């Protein structure tokens, strides 16, 4: 019975993957689902909604892979390809500091030419030290598991050694991107060159065991089934049961408008389906239950109004200011490339809920002058 499952989940009891599947697929009033997810959110984290003042830094879009959803990647030398110099990165980090950023979110394409002294790891360590020299106190949220594996593969060194070197040079946490859908049949269609499910889980597990926290994500709304969505959430819940290193879950609905034609045509939709995204947002909150306290929608992909709705379907964080979002904007997302603190605060206040500025790891930040005291 749907109402029994919802009631148990609302109280924070674990539901099975089969029950999660029923919540996603059975016909019943979606208001029940919304209410249960909203209630569980209130029980676990209360009314306040957080945001983080951060800047995205996508150091290059030159990438050796060809994920079928990705409008960001370019070949080297192709029109629109770019590779930032360290001077350009320093300027962006300084500008971010001036705007009160506490986090740099650093990710890029997998560029085989990105090497120092013949080593890919050395290039990435240089990136980290460029940022940390410019902003020693900033939280560096850098490199997806796919990027970690790329370094390991290029240089023939272990994942553990890559993670250790990144940690020692100043990486504070990893973005849990490249998860897409943790199902190898889906991965063979949308990202055949990427690491498989087991490798993604293993890299995140190793990071957590070394004391590097990560976020978690799901790229939804393309070719995956409801069953595969639940399996993805199940993988995350089991991982978290073992390591407790996930800080949050971020649902990333696929934006197709400018994505490569084959997947775009197959999906047949340019922008995310908001009601399907909200349903999955609520099921993710209920399924991950007490294991993952923080849930974030993507205002880039849903637009701010859609992200505000997601705050009523289980989310408790509105995300980051981002300052410059490229990846999904290049795919035709309509949410914009950055938000001011005022815009985020106003959006939260419109719901009648209090807002608070967090660090990447969900610690409170003080007012602007004391900002850097929160590290
Ligand atoms: C572009 S990658 C950057 C890091 C690295 N290249 C990687 O793939 O892990 C970051 C994430 O952006 C998301 N993304 C890319 N294209 C998207 C699209 N069209 N719609 C929604 N999310 C997208 C994917 O989830 C992907 O893992
Ligand atoms: N949702 C998107 C994000 N989110 C990143 C967060 O702002 C932040 O880095 C995380 O909460 C850790 O503190 N970043 C993007 O570039 N695009 C998005 O759509
Ligand atoms: N969600 C990632 C960041 C991110 C998300 C989506 C993107 O398209 C790009 C980056 C995080 O862990 O913070
Ligand atoms: S998602 Fe990442 S790995 Fe895949 S093509 Fe885009 S930049 Fe490259």
Image (tube, helix red, strand yellow):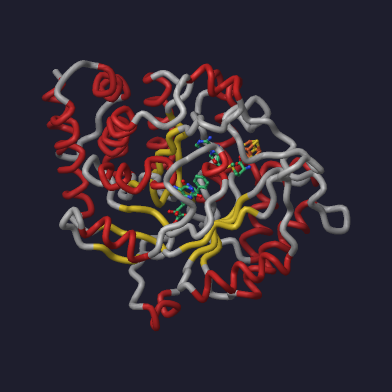
Question: Which one is in front, 127 or 152?
Answer: 127
Residue 241 against residue 175 in the figure, above or below: above
Q: Quadrant of residue 334?
A: top left
Question: Can the viewer see residue 201 in this picture?
Answer: no
- Identify the residue at image location x=45%, y=35%: 218
- Image quadrant holding the C terminus, namely bottom left
Residue 363 against residue 111 in the figure, above or below: below
User: Horizontal and vertical percent for residue 12?
Assistant: 20, 40
Q: Quadrant of residue 190?
A: top right
User: Horizontal and vertical percent for residue 182?
Assistant: 50, 29
Question: Which one is in front, 206 or 183?
Answer: 183
Most extreme residue toward the right is 117
User: Horizontal and vertical percent for residue 208?
Assistant: 50, 50
Q: Quadrant of residue 361?
A: bottom left
User: Horizontal and vertical percent for residue 167?
Assistant: 61, 61
In the picture provided, is 91 more to the left or to the right than 19? right
- Identify the residue at image location x=71%, y=44%: 80
Q: How many marks?
A: 0
Question: Can the viewer see residue 334 in this picture?
Answer: yes
Question: Which one is in front, 1 or 64?
Answer: 64
- Identify the residue at image location x=75%, y=45%: 111
- Identify the residue at image location x=18%, y=58%: 353
- Image quadrant holding the N terminus, namely top left
Most extreme residue toward the bottom is 369
Question: Which one is in front, 51 or 302?
Answer: 302
């Amino acid at each position: 019975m749907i109402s029994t499952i919802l009631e148990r989940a609302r109280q924070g009891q674990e539901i099975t993957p089969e029950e999660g599947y029923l919540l996603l697929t059975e016909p019943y009033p979606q208001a029940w689902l919304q209410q249960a997810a909203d209630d569980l959110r209130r029980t676990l984290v209360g009314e306040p909604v957080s945001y983080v003042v951060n800047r995205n830094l996508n150091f290059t879009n030159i990438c050796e892979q060809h994920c079928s959803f990705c409008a960001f990647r370019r070949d080297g030398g192709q029109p629109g390809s770019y590779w930032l110099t360290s001077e350009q990165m320093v300027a962006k980090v300084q500008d971010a500091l001036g705007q009160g950023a506490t986090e740099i979110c650093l990710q890029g394409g997998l560029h085989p030419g990105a090497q120092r002294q013949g080593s890919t790891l050395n290039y990435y360590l240089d990136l980290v030290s460029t940022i940390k020299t410019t902003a020693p106190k900033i939280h560096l949220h850098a490199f997806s598991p796919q990027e970690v594996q790329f370094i390991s593969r290029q240089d023939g060194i272990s994942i553990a050694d890559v993670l250790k070197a990144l940690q020692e040079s100043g990486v504070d946490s990893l973005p849990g991107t490249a998860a897409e859908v943790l199902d190898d049949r889906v991965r063979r269609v949308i990202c055949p060159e990427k690491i498989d499910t087991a490798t993604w889980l293993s890299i995140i597990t190793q990071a957590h065991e070394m004391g590097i926290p990560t976020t978690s994500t799901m790229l939804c709304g393309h070719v995956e089934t409801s069953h595969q969505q639940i399996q993805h959430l199940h993988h995350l819940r089991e991982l978290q049961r073992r390591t407790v290193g996930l800080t949050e879950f971020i649902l990333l609905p696929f934006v197709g408008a400018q994505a490569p034609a084959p997947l775009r045509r197959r999906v047949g939709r340019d922008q995310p389906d908001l009601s399907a995204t909200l349903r999955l947002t609520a099921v993710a909150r209920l399924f991950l239950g007490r294991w993952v306290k923080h849930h974030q929608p993507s205002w880039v992909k849903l637009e701010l109004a859609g992200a505000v709705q997601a705050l009523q379907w289980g989310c408790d964080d509105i995300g980051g200011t981002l300052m410059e979002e490229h990846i999904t904007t290049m795919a035709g997302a309509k949410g914009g490339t950055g938000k001011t603190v005022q815009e985020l605060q106003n959006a939260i206040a419109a719901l009648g809920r209090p807002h608070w500025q967090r660090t990447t790891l969900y610690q409170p930040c003080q007012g602007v002058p004391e900002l850097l005291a929160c590290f």
